[in-house]
């Protein structure tokens, strides 16, 4: 009963936050008008009949909706990625950061901005970030693989090494760009993670990855459960662990890579959200993966709403807020559960 | 299902852990694998389950090489319980045993009546039905071991391989599990278990296989394997045999060798 309550509660919270996120903002537009804009844009209502000004229409349809959807998809993808990686590594410390997704994506985006590609096309920076994320994960798993085996320990160590390499290169690119204030500003803002000025292009970029990883995750719930008893036991019980590992890593990397591509580095979601959901929902990945996705969407939409309410000018960045609220909360949870040695 | 190893060689870290081992395990028989630490018992069982890379030689099930099966197909035929303790995450006992049904289940299909029946039967077999709702990370070592054996039984495989299944069990549950393995064998399964207690091995196993430094030192009925000379050689201890039950059963007393080597 409790598990359904959690699923339903999370889903209701996600819907509520999505609605609030579209409704609230500097310009007050009432719900009736918002509904009319959405209906007319979707073709259910004649544009003239809606009776909404172009200005209001643009705010709802071109600013708030893409921002809300991007936030929901980013949160869900990061949390899914984290939940899968924590299960795969049997380690609550695992997150998209561990296998190099975030830093790889950051390097890709930073390079693209420094090369001035950002001005050339709206797609350039997200796509470079996505490519950077995937290439890094690929390198990590290639280096960690020996004779067809990829020990999870080696994977984590290679991830750490690749993180520091990509981090150093990002800093290098940044130092060369400091002379051009505008470029440096863009890079810094990107590294801080944000949902400001997200467009339908961003939604279109992440939506397929969000949908595909969500579907694919359903296929690996049981495998992840079995792999938590150790690789050999999982194999003995019938899991093709090499194949499962490759798939899980690919799905987690694509989901997190797409998030980094559209929102920059939003830390902590992939670590914190699955961890909290696991405390509430238990270790069964068939529930955990989906509850994490919903909770991730709730968390990021909530943080973004808070960020733009607190500072309409955008001085408080999403990534900064999520880490500065998530961090202490995480510490609190750990202290609270310290008595139970195993919080996983 | 007949399980056979023909001239298998297994290398781990550049060392030959099994050297040219051949053995055949018949349906309906409980075979005990015995030998000192490092003799190759675990490696042999892993190889038989298709989990250790075999450098040369062949392992087959009713004549079909085991590597012709994918992991799922192999797991429907051979159940294997590792000796190594697993990390215990807070899954419930019945959820854990249900994981044994994995090779029988479709990717997205729900649990069937047959799955639930197999889980219930396996839990009854190991006397753990009352543990069903408990979380496995809160069980005692012995309880967890019985649950893991139940998980292996739930797959209802014709071949069962268990690596030191008695390691964490008290005397009573040890005897209970031996009785279960005997029952599984008499239902026609091929059962192989490694164990350390020579007295239990001699009393309960139909056949014994004695490993020494990666080679088979002896195999056959208990009487022919558990001889003073072979025990001394394989374990490096002095053995004495006490006849009990009017000579029907034999009891071994083992002592460290003194002043030699």
Image (tube, coloured by chain):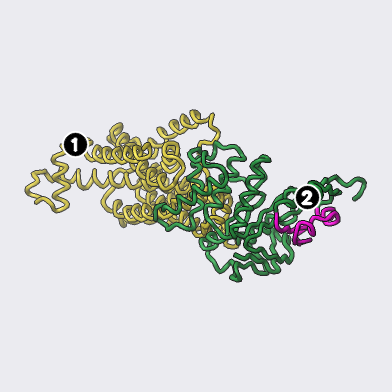
Chain colours: A yellow, B green
Quadrant holding the N terminus of chain B: bottom right
Q: Residue at x 15, y 48 (%)?
A: A39
Residue B13: in sight, yes or no? yes
Q: Residue furthest left?
A: A49
Q: Position of residue B78 (x, y in %)?
A: 57, 59
Judged left or right of residue B163, residue A170 is left
Query: Label 2 to label 1, Cα distance in Å?
Result: 92 Å
Residue at the spot x=49%, y=32% of the render? A334
Residue B235 is situated, as x and y percent measured from the top left of the image, at 81, 52
Which residue is nearer to you in this view: A281 or B202?
B202
Which residues fall within the magenta stretch?
B205-234
Crowd class of label 1 (few under 14; some 14 to 19; many from 20; radius 10 Å): few
**Residue most toward the right?**
B259
What residue does disc 2 label?
Answer: B249
Badge 2 density bin: few <14, some 14–19, many ≥20, Cα 10 Å: few
Mark sitting on residue A27: 1
- The answer, for residue A111, to whether it is visible in the render is no
Q: Nearer the viewer, mark 2 or mark 1?
A: 2
Above or below, A277 relative to A221: above
Instruction: Report helix, strand or loop for mark 2.
Output: strand
Q: Is residue B214 magenta?
A: yes
Assess whether mark 1 and mark 2 are in contact (beta carbons under 8 angstroms).
Answer: no
- Residue appearing at x 70%, y 50% in the figure: B195
Q: Which one is nearer the viewer's eye here, B5 or A132?
A: B5
Which chain does the residue under circle 2 lie in?
B
């Amino acid at each position: 009963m409790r598990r359904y309550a959690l699923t339903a509660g999370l889903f209701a919270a996600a819907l509520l936050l999505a609605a609030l996120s579209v409704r609230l903002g500097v310009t007050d537009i009432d719900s009736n008008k918002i509904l009319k804009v959405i209906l007319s844009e979707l073709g259910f209502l004649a544009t003239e009949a809606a009776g909404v000004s172009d200005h209001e229409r643009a705010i709802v349809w071109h600013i708030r909706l893409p921002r809300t959807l991007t936030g929901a998809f980013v949160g869900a993808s990061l949390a899914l990625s984290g939940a899968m990686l924590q299960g795969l590594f049997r380690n609550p410390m695992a997150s998209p950061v561990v296998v190099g997704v975030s830093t790889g994506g950051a390097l890709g985006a930073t390079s693209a901005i420094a090369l001035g590609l950002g001005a050339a096309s709206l797609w350039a920076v997200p796509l470079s970030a996505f490519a950077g994320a995937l290439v890094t994960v690929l390198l990590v798993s290639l280096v960690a693989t020996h004779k067809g085996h990829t020990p999870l320990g080696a994977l984590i160590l290679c991830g750490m090494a690749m993180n520091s390499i990509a981090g150093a290169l990002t800093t290098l690119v940044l130092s060369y760009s400091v002379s051009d204030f505008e470029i440096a500003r863009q890079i810094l803002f990107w590294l801080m993670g944000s949902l400001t000025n997200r467009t339908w292009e961003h939604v279109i970029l992440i939506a397929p990855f969000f949908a595909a990883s969500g579907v694919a995750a359903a296929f690996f719930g049981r495998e992840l459960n079995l792999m938590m008893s150790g690789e050999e036991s999982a194999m003995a019980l019938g899991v093709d662990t090499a194949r499962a590992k490759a798939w899980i890593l690919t799905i987690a990397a694509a989901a997190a890579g797409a998030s980094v591509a559209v929102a920059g580095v939003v830390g902590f979601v992939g670590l914190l959200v699955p961890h909290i959901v696991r405390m509430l929902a238990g270790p069964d990945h068939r529930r955990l993966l989906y509850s994490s996705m919903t909770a991730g969407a709730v968390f990021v939409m909530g943080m973004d709403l808070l960020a733009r309410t607190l500072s309409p000018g955008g001085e408080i960045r999403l990534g900064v807020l999520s880490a500065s609220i998530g961090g202490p909360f995480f510490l609190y949870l750990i202290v609270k559960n310290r008595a139970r040695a195993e919080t996983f | 299902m007949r399980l056979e190893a023909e001239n298998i060689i297994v290398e781990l870290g550049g060392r030959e852990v099994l050297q040219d081992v051949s053995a055949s395990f018949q349906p309906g028989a409980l075979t005990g694998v015995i030998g000192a630490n490092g003799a190759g018992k675990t490696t042999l069982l892993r190889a038989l389950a298709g989990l250790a890379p075999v450098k040369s030689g062949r392992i087959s099930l009713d004549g079909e090489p085991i590597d012709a099966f994918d992991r799922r197909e192999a797991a429907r035929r051979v159940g294997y319980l590792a000796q190594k303790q697993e990390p215990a995450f807070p899954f419930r006992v019945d959820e854990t045993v249900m994981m044994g049904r994995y090779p029988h289940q479709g990717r997205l299909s729900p649990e069937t009546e047959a799955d639930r029946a197999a889980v219930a039967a396996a839990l009854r077999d190991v006397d753990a039905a009352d543990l069903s709702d408990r979380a496995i990370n809160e069980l005692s070592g012995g309880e967890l071991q019985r649950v893991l054996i139940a998980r292996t039984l739930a797959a209802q495989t014709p071949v069962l391989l268990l690596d030191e299944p008695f390691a964490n069990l008290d005397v009573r549950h040890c005897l209970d599990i031996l009785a279960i393995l005997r029952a599984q064998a008499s239902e026609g399964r091929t059962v192989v278990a490694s164990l350390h207690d020579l007295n239990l091995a001699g009393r309960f196993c139909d056949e014994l296989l004695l490993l020494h430094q990666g080679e088979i030192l002896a195999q056959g009925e208990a009487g022919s394997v558990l001889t003073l000379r072979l025990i001394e050689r394989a374990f490096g201890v002095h053995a004495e045999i006490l006849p009990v039950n009017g000579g029907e059963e034999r009891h071994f007393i083992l002592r460290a060798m003194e002043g030699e080597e």
